[in-house]
Image (spheres, coloured by chain):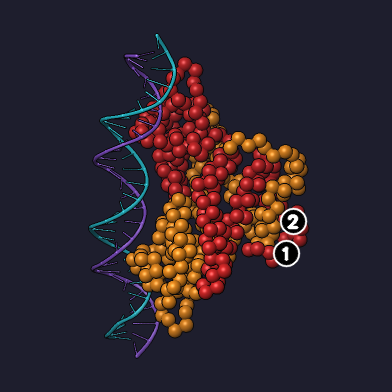
Chain colours: A red, B orange, C cyan, D purple
Amino acid sequence: MSAFMDITEVRSFILHWGEMGTQWGVNRSVAQMHALLYLSDRPLHAEEICTRLGLARSNVSNGLKELQSYRIIRRVHVEGDRRDHFVADTDLWDMLMKIAAERKRREIDPTIQLLGELAESLDGRTQLPPHIHERIGRMHEFLGTLTNWYDDVRRLPRPTLVALMKLGGRIARFIPGGKTKPSADTD
Amino acid sequence: MSAFMDITEVRSFILHWGEMGTQWGVNRSVAQMHALLYLSDRPLHAEEICTRLGLARSNVSNGLKELQSYRIIRRVHVEGDRRDHFVADTDLWDMLMKIAAERKRREIDPTIQLLGELAESLDGRTQLPPHIHERIGRMHEFLGTLTNWYDDVRRLPRPTLVALMKLGGRIARFIPGGKTKPSADTD
DNA sequence: CTTTAATTTCTGAAATTAGAGAAATTGGGT
DNA sequence: ACCCAATTTCTCTAATTTCAGAAATTAAAG
């Protein structure tokens, strides 16, 4: 039943994924649970995740909720078993896009919102040093540009996305003005 | 001398930036220091950062070192003052690229390295379930594709980058077979 | 070379976050 | 409706991270 966890490469992967999580503001256990599900070729139920990772049932429950909120794992029903089972995305593009979408929603969107409000409330306060208004405004615009771009490309069909990525910097050839002498626009 | 910190919008920005930091695995104080320097139009020395943010001198010292390691702030010498002073990038593209470069170096590159080793050590172990080798291999390849893309586009002149970003998903028109319909969106 | 300002490193305390186990709740099966 | 497996919520403890102050180091100025 668990030769799986005896494979040292599997353990290494899970451990490392957990550490990666902590570096990016994701709970180590949650990241480990994700790694475990990613490597599993069949749905796992909570209890099995507990024993394989040595975590308390409660934390597994919360972790599963968190991973579901990112939409990178989903609940599945297993014939003849009353317990909830879970599987992870194995399509890594999908996974990345969903994580990006959720982090945008949680962190970037509220930031843009706030920056907009701050910029607005600084409007026309001529007694203040103007560079403050300008820099907050520029950050606002910058994050807006980034997220608009993301919202746009995330809707591309997967093969197109992959093709674009493979093309890398050579995509610049298609830009009017090319990569030669371009116009100074926004920063 | 410090009407600056009395502007509520400045305080809000700094506070929010600190919180953003914590969400992305960056120390709150470090992020606040960065925000302060970003909004300042002149070089600040460590002591001034201490008093403005209410931090201990030691932490400011460490934070400055961390921000310098990302190369998003730099030391400057101020005429007739013996203390080190610091300024932040105000070019946000630059800033983003440098942060990405450093996080790649610290976190992604070692991960790719590890995944490569794991995949290699799984090669030809026919008694193991093949999906494990396949999934670790796919993750390895995926991260490789992403970082190669990044290494490529980061070298583009900034105006080209901006133009590409403005173009958004319409860039797909230049891909063979790229003008297909957007993918159905489950989230 | 000596003095002293400036900075960094070290150490322990405070605050925060993660995690285990118990208690409470939910929901399917009969 | 009742029972019991499954899950979630709650509470307390452990681990980690952050951070202030002290001590040590570095380096500019005379």
Where is residue A70? Give x, y as percent. Answer: 51, 39
> How many residues crowd around disc 2 within 10 Å: few (fewer than 14), some, or many (20 or more)?
some
Give the residue drawn at x 36%, y 33%. Answer: A58
Mark 1 residue type:
Pro
- Which of the pair B70/B163 is nearer the observer? B163
Look at 37% across and 70% down and name the residue there: B51
Task: Please state if A38 lies on the left or on the right of A160 as rendered.
Answer: left
Instruction: Give the structural element (helix, strand or loop) at label 2.
Output: loop
> In this rendering, would C9 be left or right of B22?
left
Q: Quadrant of residue B58?
A: bottom left
Asked whether residue A130 is in view, the answer is yes
Q: From the viewer's perspective, is residue A123 above or below residue C27?
A: below
Q: Which chain carries label 1?
A: A
Report which residue position mark 2 lands on. Answer: A175
Q: Where is residue B63 in the image (x, y as percent from the top left)?
A: 41, 63
The residue at 56%/66% (across/down) is A123
Element class at badge 1: loop
Q: What residue type is labelled 2?
A: Ile
Look at the numbered discs 2 and 1 and tell me whether their residues touch, using CB distance below 8 Å: yes
Q: How many marks?
A: 2
Kindly identify which residue carries mark 1.
A182
Q: Alpha-carbon distance for marks 2 and 1?
A: 10 Å
Image side of residue B108 versus residue A62, left or right:
right
Of the 4 image quadrants, the one containing the C terminus of chain A is bottom right
